[in-house]
Amino acid sequence: MMKIENERLELSDELSRHIFSSEPENGLKLIRDLPDLTAKARGNCLLLEGSHEKILLVKRFLEILGQRIDQHEAVNAVEVRRLFNQVTSVKPLMSGVTESFNFSDLIASFSGRVVRAKTPNQQAYINAIENNTITVARGPAGTGKTYLATAMAVRALKEKKVSRVILSRPVVEAGESLGYLPGDLKEKVDPHFRPLYDSLQEFIGMGKFEQYVRQGVIEITPLAYMRGRTFNESFVVLDEAQNTTLPQMRMVLTRLGYGSKMVVTGDHTQIDLPRTSDSSLLVLDKILDNVESIKFVDLATEDVIRHEVVRRIISAFDAYQAKERKQQ
């Protein structure tokens, strides 16, 4: 028989504002939706009655949310719900319950906003980059694959661990035929590299970004232009890797020189090659699984940081595609 416990938790003014807000799905409603638990508001206090496990989950959630608030993170209703879903999906521990959610500061943006991991998987991704020569991140849109890789590249540059940053992606996925496009090389590839430009400018500002590009400290180049080169003391990011073939992937991985790191990012559900089976991302782990200092990290729907509807869209597409595969 389940043992029922009671707990009275006094919340700070800021924390109670987020838990007892006027939002339709505020923190209190999320807590009340947990099975085997009842929750009531009494001023700035939260009264809980239920199983020990569920009460521990709520205390874990409140502790981590309080830490985020104390760190002056932007916390809105969507962030509260996302954090609640993360916390309640991880088995609670009797001690050190916040261990997997203690995310250290990564870098400050140009505007002063502190950038850090938002989920345990994102923190694992950052750790993999720090501890390995090559990291391959796979996951759906909005999970921070490119954003965090770019942040790590800029941090390595600022800390003088590398002397330059190389960002690349396949431009025209089925062969990178740029000649027919008007303008010089930069004008040809600009639209394809806009997401990378945006991330870099967020971290170092427009002026510094343009200066680094002129000096060659930051190089943004189509994948085809990496052939025959060697990158020493560089942080290389290959984006949209799902649109590379095996020969292209082999080529770019073997460009890595001394004192360098590489991050490869891609989403296997968004392959634009004429034949999906040609994507190197589908088999890369089988080829490199036993190679030392290469780490594969898989991000998932729960790591999506964009608008909540993006998470729902991804889940809906995944469910539809799984159903289609079963019927085939």
Image (cartoon, helix red, strand yellow):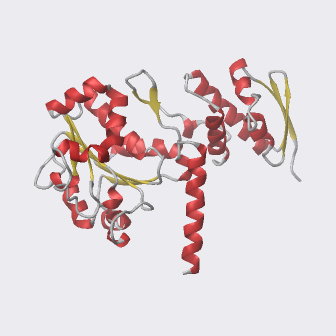
Viewer-nearest residue: 212 or 105:
212
Q: Position of residue 300 (x, y in %)?
A: 52, 53
Residue shown at the point (62%, 39%) measured from the top left: 83
Residue at the farthest bottom position = 328
Please state if 66 lies on the left or on the right of 189 as rendered.
right
| Res 46 quadrant in image | top right
Please state if 91 lies on the left or on the right of 282 as rendered.
right
Q: Position of residue 286 (x, y in %)?
A: 35, 67
Height in image: 208 above or below 34? above
Q: Position of residue 4 (x, y in %)?
A: 88, 43
Viewer-nearest residue: 187 or 112:
187
Q: Quadrant of the C terminus?
A: bottom right
Residue shown at the point (53%, 46%) measured from the top left: 304
Please state if 304 lies on the left or on the right of 289 as rendered.
right
Residue shown at the point (20%, 29%) measured from the top left: 212
Confirm whether residue 291 shows in the render.
yes
Q: Position of residue 229 (x, y in %)?
A: 11, 50
Please state if 24 lies on the left or on the right of 268 as rendered.
right
